Image (cartoon, rainbow, N blue to C red):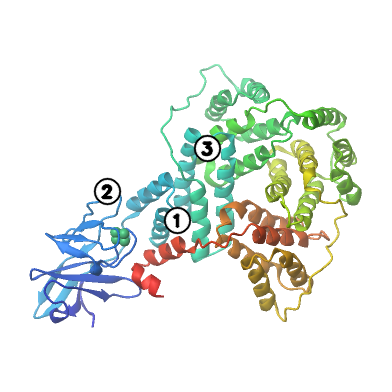
Amino acid sequence: MVTQEAEWTKLADLSEVPLGEAKAVQIGEGRSIALFNIDGKLYATDNQCPHMGYPLTRGRVRHGILTCDWHERSFDLEGGGCFNVECDDLQTFPAEVRGGEIWVELGDWTYRRKAEHLSLLWEGLLSGDRWTMSKAIALLLKGGVAEVEIVELVLQHLGRHIASSHGSEAGWDIARLMNGLAVGRRYNDSDRLIALTTAASASSGGAAERLEVVPLPEPVGWENIEPWVRTFSRDGHSGRIERCLFTAYTLGDAEKILPLLFECTVEPHFLGFSDNLISLGYLSEAVDEFGWEKASELVFNLGSKLVGRGRGEPQRFRRDAIGIMREKLSELETGEKTTTDYDEDAFVNAVSSVDVQRAFDAVTSALRGGVSVDKLISTLVILSADRMARTPVNVDAGWECLTTELNLAASLRTVQHIAGDAAAAKGIFHSAWLTFDNRWLNIPSRTLTPLPVEVEFNAGSEEEGLQQITNAIETLNVQAVGGQVLGYLNAGYSSERLLHALGKAILWDDTGMEILPTLRTVLDEWKNCAGHPARNQLIVALARYATDIRTNKDSQSATTTAMRFAEGRTTVEIFDD
Ligand code: FES
């Protein structure tokens, strides 16, 4: 029985720990203390190995060195210092024998290892080891460290990693980081931890030191920088843009930088580089979330790589499309665009007609007719969701192309928010081009009306309906899942609960990393497209995508173990559960 006296606690009778033996004593929920009787002297340590949580009572002691039985990390039994540099020190406690009883001074358990755990996270980010990241994040959160502080470190790492190791393709990393954060906020506990760890994993990799970027010498002002950035962007000189952006920032023109980058990337010559708009959207979010000081390195470096990327010689269709878009832009006026009542069916037919001239004509006439950019974005979002909801899955479903369509359309809301209607209107041409470019998918054109329910749905309750849908995802039943989602929604059951359950199924599957951007888009667009008759296609699309690319692996262990680890429990108890 555990007895307490001031800071000292009686943990056992001496007779319970014979000479040369060890014993674990539970103290409160989770945590246990290891008692060792070595050469007649009593030692007390945390029983959880700081490496991966194996119980140290199962280790061995020689010459005052305690060695864990799992991966052989060794510790000074008395002071707790770890002899292996990549492992934390072990917490030890003063122990004494009083009249046949073992007393231990447990002291207070206030969390004091923030610095160590932040450097553990940094190490995990460098090595890409998911367990190290999960453990560090779980310990930091358990210790009361604010999530924002953890994520700032991840962002700082990502900035260095991209600057030293990646080109414009790194937009994918920032997408997963920002979407992991956004999705994680909708969940708690281990669900949130897995979203955060997935976001951190996406940011991991080598991060070498690089030369500091310094501002251009005076006299330089925004009036020089703006045309220079546009020129370098058009000419594909990414390296020259970064210094211009940094100079603008030091001159106090930070708020002009993102609109300029968006304006550069909606130009006709960037048709076919849709990831530019999507990635710039996430960079804007990073600035919103963390401020310029924290996000500037990442934004300047990746932003330059995006808007200054080489584009090569365009093939025939793209070359023609660039020419048509230039012509159409000259026909557009800058007047107010507020009409929401327009012929959506005609617009959708034209955009998905496999005729780029017709598609761009339709965009131009909608914009000239004053149709609001918001409205057109919603149409494009639902169009891409509808295509995902119908793409045949017995051949190459084209998920990468289709999800890019969806995410690009949704990203135009950020373009509109940051750079205004004119830039977003140009972005609509990019969205229409992508639908044309994905013509090989052969998805027939149709009006944006509700899909017919082709599968019998007979769940007796909302609970049962949710269960059927998650079972279909887990058993890879992509033929059934779309119909089940429609049946569930048509029955009037909660869409919020369904989205929550779908997100959870995705997070705990190995596809989480890949699906995060689309999951987040569907979560946001479900609200943005409220009232649209074909809105249900968003959830059908997500469910089919998640089911079809699922691989049925198990990514739960690192996160689950990390959660229990942070509670102080040993792996044996965790696996016994
Ligand atoms: S060395 Fe102890 S758990 Fe790995």
Residue 253 sits in quarter: top right
Gap between marks 3 and 1 measured at Cα:
22 Å
Q: Amino acid at mark 1?
A: Ala
Residue 288 sits in quarter: top right
* Residue 569 showing in the rendered view: no
Up-down: is 424 above or below 92? Answer: above
Up-down: is 156 above or below 21? Answer: above
Residue 449's spot in the image, x, y percent? Answer: 86, 59
Mark 3 or mark 1, whichever is nearer to me? 3
Ligand 1's quadrant: bottom left
* Residue 217 showing in the rendered view: yes
In the figure, is residue 76 to the left or right of 399? left
Check disc 3 and report the residue beneath it: 298
**Badge 3 density bin: few <14, some 14–19, many ≥20, Cα 10 Å:** many
Gap between marks 3 and 2 measured at Cα:
30 Å
Residue 548's spot in the image, x, y percent? Answer: 67, 59
Residue, x 76% and y 75% (percent of image)? 457
Mark 2 or mark 1, whichever is nearer to me? 2
306 or 468, nearer to the observer: 468
